[in-house]
Image: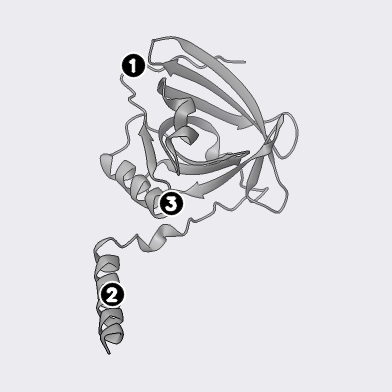
Amino acid sequence: MFNQIWAALLYLYGILLNSIYQCPEHSQLTTLGVDEKEFPEPHLGQWYFIAGAAPTKEELATFDSVDNIIFNMASGSAPLQLQLRATIRMKNGFCVPREWIYHLTEGSTDLRTEGRPDMKTELFSSSCPGGIMLKETGHGYQRFLLYNRSPHPSEKCVEEFQTLTSCLDSRAFLLTPRNQEACKLSSN
């Protein structure tokens, strides 16, 4: 009898906790459709890296010394290819240029990074105006990254990203400071 009462109390306590700390209904990510006719057109152009989330701090460590990052996504030289250029403003003020190529996977929303066969990138919609979310997985890491067309999206956008990724077991969170002027993108 005592065990049944105890089980009922624990069940009610669980319901109460779930109602207080409930994850948003959209905790399932909405994948952006990769339609060869439309994609990547809406995603081309300039993007700012806003925030990252991951299960552990180590998976975000690569961004610890970053103040801001600006990206430019362009169509690649071959079909199903995207060229990404970035300039990274380090906290020490230095600018670091980077370039890489994404290969679109036919019939999938996955992007593969040239030269990194272990890395997979998936694109997801964001409730934030002008926003997009990426999920990167590779050998020994998984992280979510929030990008926006504006270098300073609303706090609500960042809070929604943090809440959503927390519901997806990403307990570590990193917000880029964006205190310094963004570096100029090279025009290759």
- In the drawing, what numbered circle is on residue 42? none
| Residue type marked 2 | Leu
Of circles 3 and 1, which is in front? 3
Q: Is mark 3 on a helix, strand or loop?
A: loop
Q: Which residue is drawn at 28% across and 75% down?
A: 10
| Residue type marked 3 | Asp
Count neighbours of disc 1 (C-alpha within 10 A) and say few if under 14, some if 14 to 19, many if 20 or more.
Answer: few
The one of 22 and 41 positioned closer to us in this rendering = 22
| Residue type marked 1 | Gln
- In the drawing, what numbered circle is on residue 169? 3
Residue 75, picture quadrant: top right
Please name the residue that numbered disc 1 is placed on.
180
- Residue 136, horizontal then vertical, whole percent: 56, 41
Of circles 1 and 2, which is in front? 2
Q: Is residue 11 left or right of residue 78?
A: left
- Residue 125, horizontal then vertical, whole percent: 47, 50
Please name the residue that numbered disc 2 is placed on.
10
- Residue 17, horizontal then vertical, whole percent: 26, 66
Q: Is residue 113 left or right of residue 173?
A: right
Decide: is 9 above or below 114. below
Count neighbours of disc 2 (C-alpha within 10 A) and say few if under 14, some if 14 to 19, many if 20 or more.
Answer: few
Q: Distance between the residues labelled 3 and 2?
A: 23 Å
Residue 94, picture quadrant: top left
Q: Residue at x 71, y 54 (%)?
A: 107
Q: How far apart are marks 3 and 1 (CA)?
A: 31 Å
Q: How far apart are marks 1 and 2 (CA)?
A: 51 Å
Question: Which of the two labelled residues, at mark 3 and mark 1, occupies the earlier sequence position?
Answer: 3
Considering every residue shown, the one lying at the far right of the view is 78
